[in-house]
Image (cartoon, helix red, strand yellow):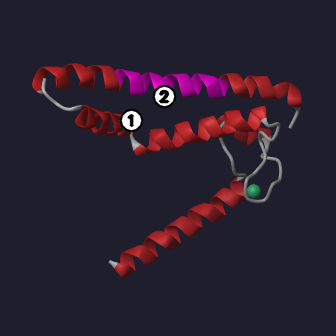
Amino acid sequence: MDLNKVPKFKDQLEDIRASLLGEVAKNLKSNKEDFVEAEPDLTDDATRSTNRQLLLNLGEQDWDQLKKVEEALDNIKNGVYGICKKCEKAIPEARLELVPFANHCVQCLEVIEEEKRIDKLNNKDLN
Ligand SMILES: [Zn+2]
């Protein structure tokens, strides 16, 4: 990875994070207003657990993305950005340009997807 290119990826990652967090804030705000009108006497505990649910309203995929983005930003800080977590080889820049928060190279990702698919099949058998 050309270190001169890292700031560009960092900018992209921060943009993605800002827009994901913006969604959370929007969800929280609009839901909170409805919520206060509907249930004025809820306890703090109920409010807290509702907030957790609202955060989850961001969607599993978005949460997943947010986690990856934050991980990638951490990696930049630690000087290990763009390195595949599985095989520890450099992730090609062309891939990072498409997916700046990628933490696996394409080859390893295929292996992981396949493992997930098999896992799912196995779980289905159990149920
Ligand atoms: Zn790899």
Tags 1 and 2 in contact by the CB under 8 Å rule?
A: yes
**122 sits to left or right of 9:** left
Secondary structure state at the residue bearing disc 2: helix
Q: Quadrant of the C terminus?
A: bottom left
- Where residue 105 appears, as percent x and y from the top left, is 72, 52
- Where residue 11 appears, as percent x and y from the top left, is 68, 22
Query: Which residue in the structure is indicated by mark 1?
Result: 58
Q: Is mark 2 within 8 Å of ligand 1?
A: no
Magenta segment, which residues?
Answer: 12-26
Q: Quadrant of the N terminus?
A: top right
- Where residue 58 appears, as percent x and y from the top left, is 39, 35
Q: Which of the pair 46/14 is nearer the observer?
A: 46
Amino acid type of the residue that numbered disc 1 sits on in the rendered structure? Leu
Quadrant of res 47:
top left
- Where residue 72 appears, as percent x and y from the top left, is 68, 38
> Badge 1, how many Cα within 10 Å: few under 14, some, many 20+?
some
Indicate whether 38 appears above or below 62: above
Ligand 1 shows up in the quarter that is bottom right
Indicate whether 114 appears above or below 26: below
Residue 20 disc label: 2
